[in-house]
Structures are given as C-alpha cells and as structure tokens.
Image (tube, rainbow, N blue to C red):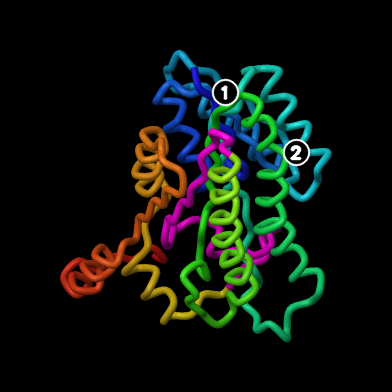
Amino acid sequence: MKTVVITGSARGFGFEMAKLFKKNELNVVVCDVNEVELKKAVNDIEKIKSKSDVIGVVVDVTSKRSIKNLIDETLDKFKTIDIWINNAGVNQPNKTIWDLSEKEISTVFDIDLKGTVICSNMVMPIMIKQKSGAIYNVEGHGSNDATILGLSIYGTAKRAITYFTEALAYECEKEKTNVIVGKITPGIMITNFIHTSLGDGKEIIIDEKTKKIYNILGDYPETIAKFMVTKIIKNTENRAKFVWLSPLRAFYRFLSYPFKKRNFFR
C-alpha cells in the first residue's frame, strides 16, 4: 500500500487531497504547523472508510529538524514514502514590494520557496534508496510570469518553484534515480488563503476588480483536488504538469460569465 505525504494539509487544498488519497486506499500523512487544525483534519480523515491509514505530524517546513522528524515518523509507521506533495505556503500582505518589511519578505520565501527546496532535498535520498518515488510541487501566481499588484513576492517565490521543479526533474532523469518530479497547477482556489497573509490570519482586503476575476476563474479546492489526485495516482511520467485552469477552461469561463455568474464573496 502506497504512502503519500502532503505538507500544509490541515485545511484547504492539501486537506481535500488528503481525503481523496485516503478514499483511494493510500496511507496518508497529514502535516501542518498548526497543531489544533492538524488534529481536527486527522479526525475527519479517520472517518473515511478505507483499508489505508492516516497519521498527523506537526511540521515546520522552514526547519530541517522538523522535516527530519516528519520523514522519520512516516517511515516508522508506513516504511515507505511513495508520493510527497510540497503544498505548504502562505500569501503575502497586499502591499507593494517597497512597503513590505524584511520579515514579511523572508516569511514568504522561507515557507513558499525554501520549504519546498529543503523538503525535496531531504526526501530525495529516501526515494533513491527505495528506487522509486514521486515529488509534486504546487505552482501558483507568478509561475507563468503573470503580475498582479500586491502579489510580487509571492509570485517571485512561485516562479522560482517552477524552475526548481524543472531542475529537480532534470537531475532525477540524468542521474537515473527512478524518482519522478511533477508540477501541480491548481489555478485560483477559493480558500482562506486568499483572505489572509503570512499564515497568521492577517486579513487581506480584496478589491472589487480582483473579486470579479476570482468569481469568474475561481473554484473550491475540493473540485480541483479531485482532478489532481486522479492525475497523480495514474501518473508514471517524469516532468508531468497537471493544469486545472487551462486556457480553454479560462476562455469558457469569461465567455459564459454573463450567463452563469458566481459569487464567492457573499
């Protein structure tokens, strides 16, 4: 029975993926920095009828010691790590680059970028030793070079994630590791993430123009998770990229919006 580890999975997109992996008979390791949210998530997932199991591990993806503990607990319980999804991330305050403090900039880079790099760095030797495994990194705004006022640092981190994932996939291939690496591109998700910054609940004020874009292109995480989990389970190819908000889907959303208006901000 395969085992999947999802960072930042106590709620939102990570949580919805965790539930679906459990339903598909994969052992699931839910991990998050918020212990209260983590316990609630594990309790909810335990209710899903499946032959597989679930555990929760508190983890700070900016700490190598914490990540090592996550890996050790996973191997102690399930013996292998077959799929690792770097999902943990925080939003930035809705400010221009010059208005952000050094701490705010560092927090975004440390969690969104460095966390993904260090987790991948530490789990790769485990997968190489197993002679199998898959790592998936979550892209976001900035991965396609798009720019939006107030998301510049977050976008910079996500653009770096895209390059890092491509580089890791290339090295895995050239070194014949038997590990595959891919990208998850969920598009715009309607979660608490878009309303708060830095993972500490500081509210982000969303202007009406941005709300309109979210209403046209956004989806709830459970919808996107269903698409992604199916793709991940079936995938055997290195460099795979799973895109929910494709150009065709986006075009249809804009075309149909006058007739099928949605409002996620009621």
Q: Picture coordinates of residue 152 (x, y %)? A: 61, 77
Viewer-proximal residue among 190 and 265: 190
Up the image or down, 78 lies above or below 240; here it is: above
Residue depicted at 42% across the width and 74% down the height: 211
Label 2 or label 1, whichever lies nearer to me, is 2
Residue depicted at 83% across the width and 39% down the height: 65
Q: Picture coordinates of residue 193 (x, y %)? A: 56, 59
Viewer-proximal residue among 124 and 192: 124
Categorize mark 1 by other alpha carbons within 10 Å: few (<14), some (14-19), many (20+). many
Q: Which residues are magenta?
A: 176-204
Residue 46 relative to residue 113: left or right? left
Mark linked to residue 67: 2
Residue 236 is drawn in which quadrant?
A: top left
Residue depicted at 24% across the width and 67% down the height: 253
Residue 266 relative to residue 111: left or right? left
Q: Is residue 199 visible?
A: no
Report the residue marked by disc 1: 54
Which element type, helix, strand or loop, lies under badge 1? strand
Residue depicted at 48% across the width and 22% down the height: 47
Q: CA distance from mark 2 to mark 1?
A: 18 Å
Residue 161 is drawn in which quadrant?
A: bottom right
Instruction: Judge whether residue 189 is colored magenta.
Output: yes
Going from N to C along the chain, the mark reached first, 2 or 1, is 1
